[in-house]
């Protein structure tokens, strides 16, 4: 009996051993020795996993099996490996993966690699590169660069896309300055492909920073990467349309409370939320429309709801819904980002975000709680109740902020790219970075250069917010181009009139004349300091340099032949104190669209409106000197200097682009224009027929660079309260203006 038991045990053991050999769990001796050798060399022996010869066939959804790329099932473990290896340098931060020493010598300069022969670049990526090359950050010398941008198109890393660039890994590694991606910035809109749409770019980015759309909070590296919005190839390179909010309606409710119109995915990633929208749709104030009429052979795979959804979908016009809704739902698509996001912002339709885990665009600088409602995909059924509970004051505030953010950072590719670069520059130059208030309030971070000052009170935009007023004195800057040959010249009369103003702190004479500086005794004695500065290179743009000798907030800019009385100067300055962000002055000009020539025109005719106040007699904030010097590209300033013309137009373009407002014209004597025409020092300039032709050319050149016409027409002129009133002249504060 015992022998029989031993026989059965031996037989069972032999069968088990045979089975193990068959399944591959027991390796050949050579393999065993190999494992033993690895174990002795310090490596842990690998645990083999059985390989079944006839694995189970997995269930494949229709929209996966129909795609040629779905060739291999990805196990959960492989998915985790992909997600954890998307960015090998996941712990990268500015102090660990960015060489700040490259930025110390020449500041924040950006180098774009030369385009390689045979490499195709999409229009969107070309717009990005053109923006960088046209910005003040660009350098063509890699030795001066702080940041490097690839000329290889990395925007679309979906392997099924026709824009996908193959062999990217090899091409990137062969770049001479790659250095494992250190100090490099990579732009990307689409990553991954069906079925998982991972955030892998298909090549090792090393220590490079990412400016990426649809980036998740899990993969986003704070204060290193930059989340950018998903934008279409039709998105304008410069300028862009303004927001659609033309006026504020009180109460701020529209025809619809909440809308959405878009694709519905039956299965796969991003399908859960859109498949559930019909539960919330009521066809009244909540209109959430989806269609499954997209993709190949959609009819073969439609579900029971498709026909009904498609019929309802076709009843509504998307733009009509967008412009007549208070809130716009922005659910995730296959990826976290969606075109609906920018569309809602532009339409002043408050975005209701339903994309869990999405790092919102420019989240490092923008407080999205002031412009959007951040929802949760898991709480979809609560969204209507949530938006209905928002007070109308809050709705109005949210709507206004959507318009500010759209126009400040998102309306063009240029603004998206420049915002990205400014964010990185703030990290590099941390001691002179912008505050949250600068980014989230008018005029926005792109027009507020922190290198000018770290104190909000030094800018003309924040006086009301801070509850302060600008300094109650001005500095007069007189632009002199003619030699001083007589004591009766207009410049000396002007100097004396300005010096008598109770608000004048000092007078600066900018000597841009080819003749030597006059001796000190040639200038009249005044009660305020008179400082004579020799112009840099004797060019027109030098009148707008940020001279350290200008210590007041206000600058009174004057041509040498301007004729103004002390009373006119005083009145103009008191007006400016109420509008410190604008140009306030006397000589007005206007622009118009010439439909015959299809170009912008310039006119000096006295009409019922104006859009410019010339800087020959105008007051503005000294910050605009700094902005003109640092923000305006060298090409435009060179054009002004070569023509010796148009500097006043360019300053008006700049200030209107910043403020979105017109300048302010104040009362003046009617003879101003004729007086200027009669001055000998500028007679040749005003009589020159090429003068106005040049100004026409300037208008169109400037409009092209700004991406549109920033000038704004106005019909307002400010007069003293009792101006021309039938009361005693003795009761009028600025009585001399009427006598002129």
Image (cartoon, rainbow, N blue to C red):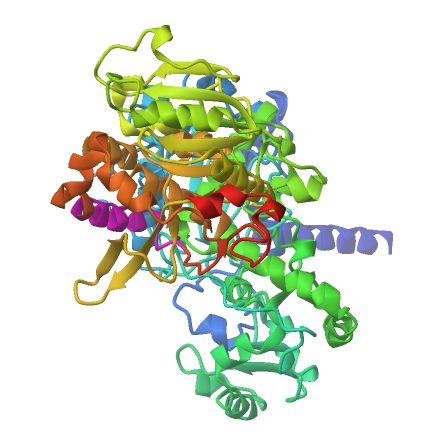
User: Quick check: 500 left or right of 147?
Assistant: right
Does 433 appear above or below 248?
above
User: Which residue lies most toward the left here?
Assistant: 689
- Report the front residue among 131 and 698: 698
In the image, residue 381 above or below residue 725: below
Magenta highlight on residue 397: no
Q: Which quarter of the picture shows residue 95?
A: top right
Residue 707 in the magenta stretch? The answer is yes
- Residues in magenta, as a range: 693-711
- Say whether residue 666 is left or right of residue 163: right
Residue 383 falls in which quadrant of the image? bottom right
In the rendered image, the vertical position of residue 738 relative to residue 142, given as above or below: below
Residue 189, given in percent of the width and then of the height, sits at 45, 53
**Would residue 465 appear left or right of 146 to someone viewing this image?**
right
* Percent of width and height locating residue 361: 56, 51
* Percent coordinates x, y for residue 433 in the rendering: 58, 30
Which part of the image, by quadrant, shows the N terminus? bottom right
In the image shown, does 273 or 503 lie closer to the viewer? 503
Q: Main secondary structure of the magenta part?
A: helix
The one of 253 and 421 positioned closer to us in this rendering? 253
**Residue 210 visible in the snapshot:** no
Residue 103 on image: x %, y % = 46, 21
């Amino acid at each position: 009996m015992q022998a029989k038991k031993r026989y059965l045990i031996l037989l069972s053991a032999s069968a088990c051993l045979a089975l193990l050999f068959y399944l591959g769990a027991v390796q050949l001796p050579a393999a065993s020795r190999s494992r033993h050798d690895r174990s002795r060399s310090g490596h842990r022996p690998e645990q083999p996993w059985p390989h079944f010869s006839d694995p189970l066939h997995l269930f494949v959804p229709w929209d996966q099996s129909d795609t040629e790329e779905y060739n291999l099932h990805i196990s959960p473990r492989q998915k985790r490996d992909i997600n954890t290896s998307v960015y090998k340098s996941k712990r990268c931060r500015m102090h660990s993966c960015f060489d700040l020493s490259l930025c110390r010598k020449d500041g924040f300069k950006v180098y774009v690699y030369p385009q390689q022969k045979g490499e195709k670049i999409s229009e969107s990526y070309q717009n990005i590169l053109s923006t960088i090359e046209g910005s003040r950050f660009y350098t063509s010398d890699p030795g001066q660069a702080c940041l490097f941008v690839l000329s290889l198109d990395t925007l679309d890393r979906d392997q099924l896309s026709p824009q996908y660039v193959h062999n990217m890994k090899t091409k990137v590694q062969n770049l001479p300055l790659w250095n494992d991606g250190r100090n490099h910035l990579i732009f990307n809109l689409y990553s991954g492909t069906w079925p998982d749409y991972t955030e892998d770019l298909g090549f090792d980015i090393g220590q490079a920073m990412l400016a990426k759309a649809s980036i998740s909070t899990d993969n986003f590296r704070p204060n290193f990467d930059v989340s950018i919005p998903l934008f279409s190839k039709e998105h304008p390179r410069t300028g862009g349309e303004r927001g659609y909010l033309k006026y504020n309606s009180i109460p701020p409710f529209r025809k619809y409370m909440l809308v959405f119109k878009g694709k519905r995915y039956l299965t796969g990633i991003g399908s859960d939320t859109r498949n559930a929208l019909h539960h919330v749709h009521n066809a009244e104030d909540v209109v959430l429309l989806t269609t499954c009429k997209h993709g190949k052979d959609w009819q073969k795979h439609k579900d029971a709801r498709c026909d009904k959804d498609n019929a309802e979908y076709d009843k509504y016009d998307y733009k009509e819904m967008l412009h007549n809704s208070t809130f716009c739902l922005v659910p995730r698509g296959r990826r976290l980002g969606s075109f609906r996001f920018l569309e809602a912002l532009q339409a002043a339709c408050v975005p209701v975000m339903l994309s869990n885990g999405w790092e919102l665009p420019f989240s490092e600088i923008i407080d999205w709680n002031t412009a959007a409602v951040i929802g949760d995909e898991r709480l979809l059924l609560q969204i209507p109740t949530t938006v209905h509970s928002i007070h109308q004051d809050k709705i109005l505030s949210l709507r206004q902020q959507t318009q500010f953010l759209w126009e400040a950072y998102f309306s063009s590719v240029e603004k998206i790219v420049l915002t990205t670069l400014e964010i990185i520059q703030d990290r590099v130059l941390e001691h002179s970075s912008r505050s949250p208030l600068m980014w989230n309030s008018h005029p926005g971070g792109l027009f507020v250069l922190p290198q000018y000052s770290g104190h909000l009170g030094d800018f003309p935009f924040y006086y009301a917010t801070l509850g302060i007023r600008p300094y109650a004195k001005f500095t007069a800057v007189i632009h002199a181009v003619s030699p001083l040959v007589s004591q009766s010249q207009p410049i000396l009369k002007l100097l004396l009139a300005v010096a008598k103003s109770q608000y004048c702190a000092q007078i600066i004479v900018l000597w841009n004349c080819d003749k030597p500086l006059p001796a000190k005794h040639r200038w009249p004695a005044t009660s305020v300091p008179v400082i004579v500065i020799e112009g840099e290179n004797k060019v027109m743009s030098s009148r707008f340099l940020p001279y350290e000798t200008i210590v007041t907030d206000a600058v009174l800019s004057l041509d040498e032949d301007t004729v103004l009385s002390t009373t006119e100067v005083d009145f103009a300055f008191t007006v400016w104190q109420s509008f410190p962000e604008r140009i306030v002055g006397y000589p007005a000009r206007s622009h118009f669209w010439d439909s015959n020539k299809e170009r912008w025109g310039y006119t000096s005719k006295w009409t019922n409106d104006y859009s410019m106040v010339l800087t020959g007699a105008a007051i503005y904030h000294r910050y605009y000197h700094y902005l003109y010097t640092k923000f305006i590209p060298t090409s435009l300033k060179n054009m002004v200097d070569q023509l010796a013309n148009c500097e006043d137009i360019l300053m008006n373009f700049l200030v209107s682009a910043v403020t979105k407002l017109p300048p302010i014209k104040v009362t003046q004597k009617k003879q101003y224009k004729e007086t200027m025409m009669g001055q000998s020092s500028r007679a040749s300039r005003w009589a020159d027929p090429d003068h106005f032709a040049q100004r026409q050319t300037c208008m169109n050149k400037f409009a092209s660079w700004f991406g549109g016409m920033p000038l704004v027409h106005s019909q307002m002129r400010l007069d003293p309260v009792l101006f021309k009133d039938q009361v005693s002249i003795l009761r009028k504060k600025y009585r001399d203006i009427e006598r002129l």
